[in-house]
């Protein structure tokens, strides 16, 4: 397939969680591919930094300081984009607790951000694309946790499994409009979200690197390229799928 299939010139993309990590890398790469990128996050300083990165490389970026769990805020930001071609719903939070120690507030918060926030982004994007008759692409962010049942991952894994169900269901419901919906399920990626556990973090990264045939953990750019692929015409016959850029890791749990 010619490289022009990855050209997003003239298209508009909306990226949640764009202030750092995978969201920032995705926003920057989509802009490098030619898209006008709307960056959304609750971290205002991080948003400014992402937009500056894009503009310094000659791209076009707009920022939206919002909380993805607030449907009204998200709806207003998406409507302000005008035409919408790509939605990358990347925003998420990390949480770890044993099943027997999981509290209601833990489950509610993780589901609110990691599932409801993605649901709202998908709904607003799909409605806009259908109204505008845009044959767009919606990319959600799942996780390798959907496959592992790893210790401590009940809330996080359950929310990400719900994102997979959302992705597959929505792909079937709106495919007739020419809109594709796919998910990315990364393995362990070194981001600000995962990089805050001190010595435990170092042990986790070393363990995950050993589990990969490639001998390393992921970087945000590794996942951003998967997002670009699913956002672009290079994946024009792909919908309802889960792309797993995880370094070949097959967990033993």
Image (cartoon, grey):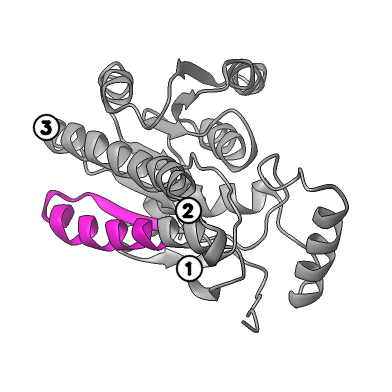
Q: Position of residue 99 (x, y in %)?
A: 53, 65
Which residues are drawn in magenta? Answer: 161-183
Q: Which residue is nearer to you in this view: 143 or 70?
A: 70
Q: Residue at x 66, y 47 (%)?
A: 221
Locate residue 202 relative to residue 142 in the image: left or right.
right
Mark 1, residue position: 146
Instruction: Tell me the element at label 3.
Output: helix
Say if 149 sits above or below 72 in the image.
below
Q: Residue at x 22, y 49 (%)?
A: 179
Residue 229, label in figure:
2
Q: CA distance from mark 1 to mark 3?
A: 33 Å
Question: Which callout, 2 or 1, points to the residue nearer the camera?
Answer: 1
Mark 3, residue position: 131
Q: How many numbered discs, if any? A: 3
Q: Which residue is nearer to you in this view: 176 or 63?
A: 63
Query: Magenta segment: does it hold 179?
Result: yes
């Amino acid at each position: 397939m010619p490289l022009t299939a990855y050209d997003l010139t003239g298209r508009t993309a909306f990226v949640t969680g764009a202030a750092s990590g995978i969201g920032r890398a995705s926003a920057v790469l989509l802009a490098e591919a030619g898209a006008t990128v709307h960056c959304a996050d609750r971290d205002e300083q991080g948003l400014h930094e992402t937009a500056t990165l894009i503009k310094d490389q000659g791209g076009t970026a707009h920022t939206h300081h919002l909380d993805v769990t607030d449907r009204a805020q998200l709806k207003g930001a998406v409507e302000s984009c005008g035409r919408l071609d790509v939605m990358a719903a990347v925003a998420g939070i990390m949480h770890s607790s044993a099943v027997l120690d999981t509290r209601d507030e833990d489950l509610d918060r993780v589901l609110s951000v990691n599932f409801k926030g993605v649901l709202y982004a998908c709904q607003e994007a799909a409605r806009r694309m259908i109204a505008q008759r845009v044959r767009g692409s919606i990319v959600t962010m799942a996780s390798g946790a959907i496959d592992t049942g790893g210790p401590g991952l009940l809330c996080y894994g359950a929310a990400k499994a719900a994102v997979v169900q959302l992705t597959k269901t929505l792909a079937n419901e709106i495919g007739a409009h020419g809109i594709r919906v796919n998910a990315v399920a990364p393995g362990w990626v070194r981001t600000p979200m995962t990089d805050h556990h001190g010595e435990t973090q170092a042990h986790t990264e070393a363990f995950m690197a050993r589990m990969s045939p490639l001998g390393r953990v992921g970087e945000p750019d590794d996942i951003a390229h998967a997002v670009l692929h699913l956002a672009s015409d290079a994946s024009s016959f792909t919908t309802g799928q889960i792309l797993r850029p995880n370094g070949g890791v097959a967990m033993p749990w």
